[in-house]
Image (spheres, coloured by chain):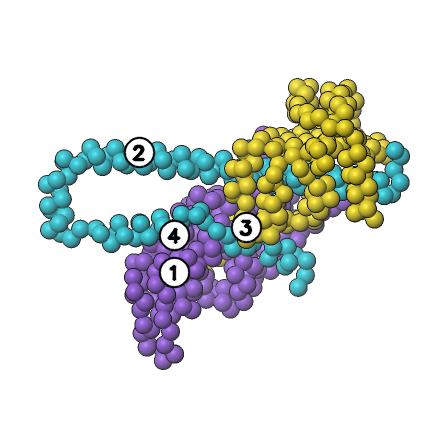
Amino acid sequence: MASVPLKELTGQSEECVPAFPEAIEAHKAMVYGIAWNFLRDRTVAEELAQDVFLLLHKKWDSIRSREHLVFWLRKVTAHRAIDLARKRKLHPETTLKATDEPTVLERLHDSFLASYLERMVASLPEKQRMVVVLRYQEDLEVEEIADVLGMRVNTVKTHLNRALDLLRAKTAVRLKKGLDSVV
Amino acid sequence: MKRNLFLFVTVLALSFGTEAQEIKMPVNLERLAERATEAVDVNLDASMLQLASGFLSKRDPDEAHVKQIVSKLKGVYVRSFEFDKEGQYSRSDLESIRAQLKNPAWSRIVGVKSVKGENSEVYLRKDGEKIGGLVVIAAEPKELTVVHIDGPINPEELSELSGHMGIPSMKLGPQKKSSHDDDENERQDER
Amino acid sequence: MNGMDEELRRALVRRDPSPDFTARVLAASQTRAAEPGLLRSWLSRLLFGRWAAVAATTLIVGGGIAYQQHERDVQGETAKQKLLVALQIAGMKLQGTQRHVLSGGER
C-alpha cells in the first residue's frame, strides 16, 4: 500500500503516513504491549492486536498523519481490550476489602504471573487497569489518556488515584508479609 | 563484601574433584505437598527451559537478563512448601537429598543455622574449572525450600535477581482476590 | 518519581508479539482485499461444491495447527512463569543465606 498524503482538513503541516507494513512493524509492540499488559493472555492479546491492524487496513484512508495513526491505534486497542475483558471476565477483580484466601489448588493452577505487581494490575477493574497501562506503558499524560478513552480528565484522575491506592495497599501488605518472614 | 564472600567460597569449591551427578528430588519430599498450605513445584528440564526462554521478552531488561542466565542451563527444579504450623517435616525428609550431595562432585560451601531454627545450606557442583550446578536447601520452622539448578550458574547473579522483576521481595504467601467490580456504576463515561 | 511509579514502568513495558506477526497480518489483510465482488461471488458459488471438501479439509487442518500453536503458547507461557518464580525463589533464598553468614550465624 503506497504512502498517503495528508488530507489538509486541519490546516496542519503535511506529513506522510508510512506504508501499511511499516506501520505494523513500527507499532506492533505498542499495540500488543497494551493488549498483553491489560489481558495477560498471550494468545488473546495477539488475536486482538491482529484485529486492530486489520481494522486499520480497512480504515487506512482515514488516517491523517503519523500522530493520528498512533492515537488511532491506542484508542482502538484500548477500547477493544476493555470490551474483550468485560466479555471474557479474564481476571477476578480486587478491592481494598479483605477477601477469602485462595485454596492450594487455585494457587497451583494459577497463571504464575512474574511479579506480584503485574498480578495486581491485571486484577484491577477494566477502566482503572487501562488507565494504568496507558499511563505507565505509554507514558501518557492524564489529558492524553482522557482523549484516548473518551473520558473526562477528572474521571481519569479518579481512576488513576484509585488504582494506585489499591496497588500501594496490596503491595504494602505483601511487603510486610515478606519482611516479617525473611530468612 | 558480599561479592568477596561468594568469590571466596566459589574458588574454594572449584578446588575439589569433579564428577557430574544428577540430583533426584525424593518421593517423600513430594508427599509434603499434602500437608502444605502452599506448595511450589517446578520441573524445567533443558527442553522446557528452551521453550520458556523463547517467551522471555528481550525488551524487558529483567527478562532479558533471565534469558541470558538460562541460556546455558540444563534444568531448574524447585520444591517449596509452606505450612500452617511447625513440625510438618523432619530432618529425615532431607536425608535423601543430602546423601546425594555427599558425592565428591558436590561441595557444601555454606551451612548456616540460627537460633530461630532457620537452616540454610548451599552446595555447588564442579564441572571442570567451572560451576556445573547449585543446590540450596532452606529449612525454616514453617517453610521448606529445595532448589536445584543444573548447569553453569553464578550464585551472585542469581541472588541479585530477587529484588527485580516488579517486586522488592517475594513470599509464597496466600493472596487476596475478590469478584467485586467497583467500576460498574460509572455510566457517565459511556464510550 | 516515586518507587511505585518506577516499578510500574518496569513492569508495564511494550512487548513484541510472535516473530511472524507482521506476515500473518499482511496475509490476512490481503485475503480480505481479495474478497470477490457480486459476479465473481456467483461464479465461485458454482464451483463451491467441487472445492468444498478441499476448503473443509484446509479449515480442519488449519484449525488443528492453530489449536496446536495455541497449546504451545500456553505451555510456553506457563513454563516462562514457572521459570521466573523458580529463579526468584532461588535468588531470595541465596540472599537470605548471605544475610545469615554476614550477620554471623552459627556454622
Q: Which amino acid does label 2 sit on?
A: Val
Report which residue position mark 1 lands on: A22
Report which residue position mark 3 lands on: B58
Report which residue position mark 2 lands on: C61
| Residue B7 image position (x, y, % from top left) | 79, 43
| Most foreground residue, C50 or B24 | B24
Chain A display color: purple
Q: What residue type is labelled 4?
A: Thr
- Badge 3: chain ID: B
Instruction: Say if A154 sits above or below A172 in the image.
Output: below
Q: Which amino acid does label 3 sit on?
A: Lys
User: Disc 3 and disc 1: Cα gap in Å?
Assistant: 21 Å
Q: Please tell me whether mark 4 sits on a helix, a strand or a loop.
A: helix
Q: Residue C22 carries which label?
A: 4
Chain C display color: cyan
| Most foreground residue, A78 or C6 | C6
